[in-house]
Amino acid sequence: MSILVVAEHDNHTLAAPTLHTLAAARQIGADIALLVAGQDVAGVGFAAAQCAGVTKVLLADDAAYAHQLPENVAPLVANLGRDFSHVLAPATSNGKNLLPRVAALLDVDQISEIISVESADTFKRPIYAGNAIATVQSSAPVKVITVRSTGFEAAPAEGGSAPIEALAGAADAGLSAFVGEELAKSDRPELTAAKIVVSGGRGLGNGDNFKHLYSLADKLGAAVGASRAAVDAGFVPNDMQVGQTGKIVAPQLYIAVGISGAIQHLAGMKDSKVIVAINKDEEAPIFQIADYGLVGDLFEIVPALTSTL
Amino acid sequence: MKVLVAIKRVVDYNVKVRVKADNSGVDLANVKMSMNPFCEIAVEEAVRLKEKGVVTEIVVVSVGPTTAQEQLRTALALGADRAILVEAADELNSLAVAKALKAVVDKEQPQLVILGKQAIDSDNNQTGQMLAALTGYAQGTFASKVAVAADKLEVTREIDGGLQTVALNMPAIVTTDLRLNEPRYASLPNIMKAKKKPLEMVTPDALGVSLASTNKTLKVEAPAARSAGIKVKSVAELIEKLKNEAKVI
């Protein structure tokens, strides 16, 4: 088994989903190359070389890779991938954008969002919004796989000392260009990496009332999320959405405030270690999966919680 | 310009699916089937582009069972001009679908192909990107805004930290995210009119594509159930439990 892992990064920092994907790779085999494709990514390459279990870092440093445009990165990954038994990437928006393009260039099917490694060719993945789990076997000469971070504990970011090999011959396919981006700025932890997540739903009533959740989150060092109902109602921006069509999170503690618990939302958080539900409707489906439920008015409970902690 | 919209027939999003007792799949007998929600958004976007005068013809295509004609008729009622069904068995993998769509793209030569970002049954999120690879076109996935500017397509994409905008050469492939638009409902007169619009049936053989797959589903199981915990009476009791029982704060 030889595994190529595509690193997730922003040209400055190696992102956490890379470590979860490395953990999946280590369950498949021991020969692991970590590809860092980007611009001015020497620092990321250095961090990649420290990760436990990495045998080699491949560094593709070129302006063509600066914004992870799949038209440019997919040919690179596909050409490298031919020499490996597996190509893995995190199931982030980048990984999901890139890897199917790689799979088609290699003329193989992809296995998306695996949550466990059964053997080198067999994997488990959720289907139907997590309402069923499929066990899928791949006969492809190169197995192309995206990895859901919540399915694997992060591999250590230290302990390795892999050699770094620079790749040459980058080319801009000339099909696409980066125009700009608007990234949400926040001092709170990133949703998918946070140990505690406080999420609000339609019960909050409006965007202003999310201030109660921000105060609680700051007391706990938590990230703040939202249900699709709260996002669709315009209370908060869509990058806060937790659920099947938003972020998939599995923190140590998930506090659902004013969230009824639609299947769509549960699919994004039901693997959290401990779930707390605060809702005035004691029949709300969220209570069926919550470890601790508190029925009552969130506008009394949340401030009380914040001041007591 | 001509736009091609690919749609999929899937279990209706309101249906709570059950895994079959023999673990061979989910039980789809007698359940309501609909157009995949992300595909409805794709159809809506094409219709809006036509209403703006950017698009002149909308061709809708599905790769699937004979019964997918129902969803194609729905797309025709929503504003597509004609439909193509590539008749194939139910559970195709994404690469096979992408290959069939590539053959249709070769024949129809659209300037833009719009697909849903993923189907709510297989949750693969692959077909659009694969079609982009096979055609060699640029891809704008998870689109929340699409604008045609001269010979480029500007696509605003939903990414993990926020939004990204890219400019794509055309022809291009776009996959839709939830907030691209809110699909309309088909009116009764339009449903009647849709019955007379052309719907062509072709076979994968006639298109010269292989539907072979390197993936095989061995079994399908219900997820581990999470059981309900306890109701606490007060904030103080909740904090006590989180500190001393769950030990998470």
Image: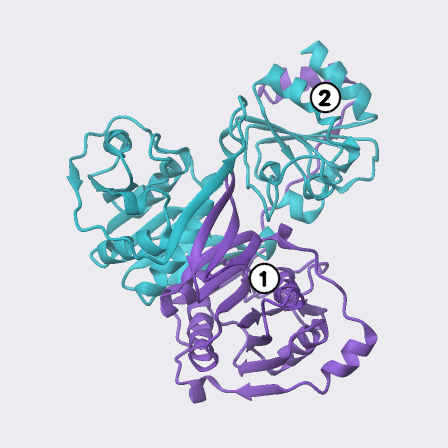
Between A57 and A308, the one lying in front of the other is A57
**Figure chain in cyan:** A
Label at residue B121: 1
Q: Residues within 10 Å of mark 2 (few under 14, many from 20)?
A: some
Have a look at marks 1 and 2 and say if they share a chain. no
How packed is label 1: few (under 14 Cα within 10 Å), some, or many (20 or more)? Answer: many
Report the amino acid beneath label 2.
His
Answer with the quarter of the image where residue B27 lies: bottom right
Q: CA distance from mark 1 to mark 2?
A: 37 Å
Q: Position of residue A49 (x, y in %)?
A: 23, 32
In-image side of A184 versus B245 (left or right): left
Quarter of the image with the C terminus of chain B is: top right
In the foreground, B158 or B26? B158
Residue A30 visible somewhere in the drawing? no
Q: Secondary structure at mark 1?
A: loop
What residue type is disc 1 on? Asp
- Res. A202 image quadrant: top right
Residue A124 is left or right of residue A294, and the answer is: left
Q: Colour of chain B?
A: purple
Q: Is residue A37 visible?
A: yes
Q: Compared to B230, does B105 lie above or below?
A: below
Q: Secondary structure at mark 2?
A: helix
Residue at 71% x, 37% y: name it. Answer: B228
Q: What residue is drawn where x is 61% and y is 83%? A: B66
The residue nearer to you, when weighing A201 against B116, is B116
Residue matched to label 2: A212
**Horizontal and vertical percent position of residue A22:** 33, 40
Image coordinates of residue B206 in percent, x first then y, are 44, 89
